[in-house]
Amino acid sequence: MKFKKLSALFVTVAFILSSFATSAFAAPSKPAPAATVVVDGNQIQINGEQPFVDKGTSFVPLKPLFNELHIALQWDNAAKTLTGVKGDLSIGLKIGSTSASVNGNAVQLSAAPRIVNGTTFVPLRFVGEATGYEVAWSQSTNTITLTSKQPQVEATSKGFMWKVQNNGNTVYLVGSIHVADDAMYPLRKEYEEAFKSADYLAVEVDLSKTDEKTSNYLIAKYGTYTDGTTLKDHVSADTYKQIGAILKSRKIAENAFDSYKPWVVSQVISTFQVADKGYEPSLGIDQYFLDNANKTKKPVIELETYEQQIKMFADFSVGLQEDMLKAAIAGYNNPNTDSSGIDELTAMWKDGDENTLASLAKQMSANEEYYKAMLADRNAGMAEKVTGFLNSPDKKTYFVVVGALHMLGDDGVVTKLRAGGFKVENY
């Protein structure tokens, strides 16, 4: 069974592990080459310090970018804050802070603006999207493109969404895919309208509240050896050799994973492959709505915690962890066979193919331990909380976004709600 093939659909923790992978195992002595920035077909000419990509975030020198986008700059050197003004748009940033603003509305950034060798760098995606551009990055050419948004086109992605009502309450259930690309968007207008009508957004984990320090602490707590042994003592010689080869190919020390347990290594290798194929956790469906909730100050409800998800992996048996690791290695070493399944999963989501989704959920039951922890137990908890929303006396609307694999199959959330007497309709 392709364990990691499915993680993009239902494991939020992979988002943070992708950042963890780049921060913990990067080769700082060899920074990524400068990226080319193109705005509506014209390359920005940048002298001095050049654009770069760090931990999945593209950084560009402030002044050349603002000049190209015709943004007036106001800089407070004492407070290390900057304000960009373009027409009736105002964006605010602070050096070293992931808190920003757009027209006074708070926005959480994936990475903070910084000063490098006397040059101020800002996260390109935030600035570009705030000023009305579509932002994309081509890893193969190391080119970041900003394209003026055209009039809204008809959505090409159908996705998975259901609607259920009870006692004056409404719940929209959205099956997410946690990593995506720009081709997933725009979403259908039904998504936007349902989200706008909701009083609350509910997600597996609110990743905007999980900082890097907490993430690294929990991964160290549950994912490292403390008994004096290393990864080499817990996996076969061949598996360890293949891990070393992967790390060497990425210019990372071949023993970089030695202190980590197989479940951590399997997830990090998976994030390597997904990133190499051009998919980004920052474009995932749940992250899209989390970003919008932060912008509009919509309250966010967590159905699980980040520590719960981390601990779930840590509790897997030794045999299951090594099976997951072997699957991750096989997928990485054979990218042309798409054993990561991310292209297939993305196509399924765009088509809204419920038959394939239900079939994938059923396939997972082939491994009882994996299925129970990843789906059955978690689905039961999610269904219980959604039932609470529906039975509440508050008469509110909830927009619930969780991994798509939690929805269908014998133990799916939608399946459980229907079995509980609720009328769940495709939306």
Image: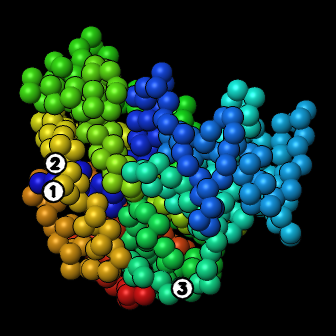
Q: Residues within 10 Å of mark 3 (few under 14, many from 20)?
A: few
Residue for badge 1: 337
Q: Earlier in the sequence, mark 3 or mark 1?
A: 3
- The answer to whether the residue labelled 2 contacts the one labelled 1, judged by CB atoms less than 8 Å apart, is yes
SS for tag 3?
loop
Left or right for 351, reference 288: left
Image point (38%, 87%), residue name: 426
Residues packed near mark 1 inside 10 Å, few (<14), some (14 to 19) or many (20 plus): few
CA gap, disc 3 to disc 2? 36 Å
Nearer to the camera, 177 or 206 = 177
**Visible residue check, residue 220:** yes
Give the spatial CA distance, label 2 vs label 1: 6 Å
Residue tagged 2: 334
- Marks 3/2 in contact by CB < 8 Å: the verdict is no
Q: In screen coordinates, is 295 left or right of 183?
A: right
Residue 394, can we see it? Answer: no
Q: Quadrant of residue 264?
A: top left
**In whole angstroms, how far apart are the C-alphas of marks 3 and 1?**
33 Å
Give the image location of residue 97, x and y in percent: 71, 40
The amino acid sitting under disc 3 is: Val
Work out whether residue 137 or residue 237 is closer to the camera in this orientation and state it.
137
Q: Are marks 3 and 1 in contact (CB under 8 Å)?
A: no
Task: Name the residue beneath numbered marker 3.
Answer: 153
Residue 392 image position (x, y, % from top left): 55, 75
Residue 266 on image: x %, y %: 25, 39
- The three-letter amino acid code for the residue at tag 1 is Thr
Give the amino acid type for the residue marked by disc 2 in the picture. Asn
